Amino acid sequence: MDIKSVSIPVKSEKLSGLLFTPKSLGVQKLPSILIFHGRGSNKKRYVDRAQALAKKGFITLIFDFRGCGESGGDFRKQTIAMGFEDAEAGFEFLKNQSLCDRNKIGVLGGSFGGYQAALLSSKYSIASLILASPAVYQDEWWGATPESIDSKRIEIYKHQSGFDKTKAIKAIRKYPGQILIIEHERDDVIPKEIIEAYWQNTLRAKLKEKKVIIGAPHALYEKKFLDRSTQIVIAWFMRTL
């Protein structure tokens, strides 16, 4: 495979990315996958999954949101809305790759990235979607940084209802493609109420499934959990793209 460092423009900043391209015979178009990391994380956390996907024949793009990893920008100023701008920029970059099959694009998003992936599904044609321990935010927080919102207020909100009125859940309710929702059994950040809200509001998908990574916390640092995540992700995208 070919691994290339790429720079993705968004507003006046640049996103640092890695593009994994399988060896291709001739000019055959290839199914392609975009991966979004979580809030304050970085693309390196997904290198293993990107490499594994590329070995299976998928063009795969990972990048750092602004203010994270090697990307430009100030993390302290990275609002939820700016995260969506970054997500759009990544999607546009991937779909414009010469070997990308635009009819077979998949998106994997974890936590904050899962929220952005859900939003993206309302604007672009995404054949297959994975939301791994996805977050959800009140619409009134759109122009704010999550760190600026009172932590007690966020904690109370996460365990209440009304998620179906948010942008992300409304988007998933209309999503017509194939969706997999991954729950981490011992997640101490994303409660089961949010996972259930995404699941119950997946109403129009032609295929929907849910997987639970047993014993996994929110962030997957241990190899056994990373390996399980990789297995699930590869199996899903090979079925649906």
Image (cartoon, grey):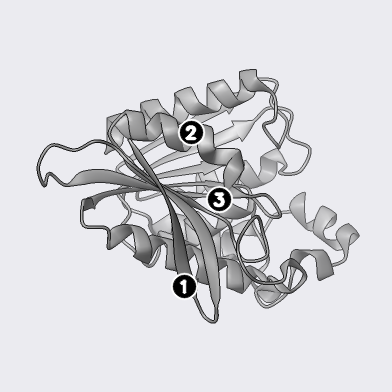
Point 49% across, 50% down: residue: 201
Q: Tell me where residue 91 appears, x and y as whole percent.
A: 39, 61
Query: Badge 1 local density, few (<14 within 10 Å), some, or many (20+)?
Result: some
In contact (CB < 8 Å): disc 2 and disc 3: no
In the picture shown, does residue 106 fall above or below 224? Answer: below
Q: Which residue is mark 3?
A: 114
Q: Tell me where residue 80 appears, x and y as whole percent.
A: 64, 68
Q: Is residue 152 visible?
A: yes
Q: Which residue is mark 1?
A: 9
- Disc 2 to disc 3, C-alpha distance: 16 Å
Q: Which image quarter holds the N terminus?
A: top left
Picture disc at residue 49: 2
Give the SS element for disc 3. helix
Is tag 2's residue or tag 1's residue first in the polypeptide sequence?
A: 1
For badge 2, the amino acid type reads: Arg
- In this view, the residue in front, 136 or 104, is 104
- Disc 1 to disc 3, C-alpha distance: 21 Å
Is tag 1's residue or tag 3's residue first in the polypeptide sequence?
A: 1
Please tell me whether mark 2 or mark 1 is closer to you in this view.
Answer: 1
Point 25% across, 43% down: residue: 31
Give the SS element for disc 1. strand
Is tag 2's residue or tag 3's residue first in the polypeptide sequence?
A: 2
- Disc 2 to disc 1, C-alpha distance: 24 Å
Q: Which image quarter holds the C terminus?
A: top left
Please tell me whether mark 2 or mark 3 is closer to you in this view.
Answer: 2
In the picture shown, does residue 215 fall above or below 221? Answer: above
For badge 1, the amino acid type reads: Pro
In the picture shown, does residue 74 fall above or below 241? Answer: below
Point 53% across, 70% down: residue: 14
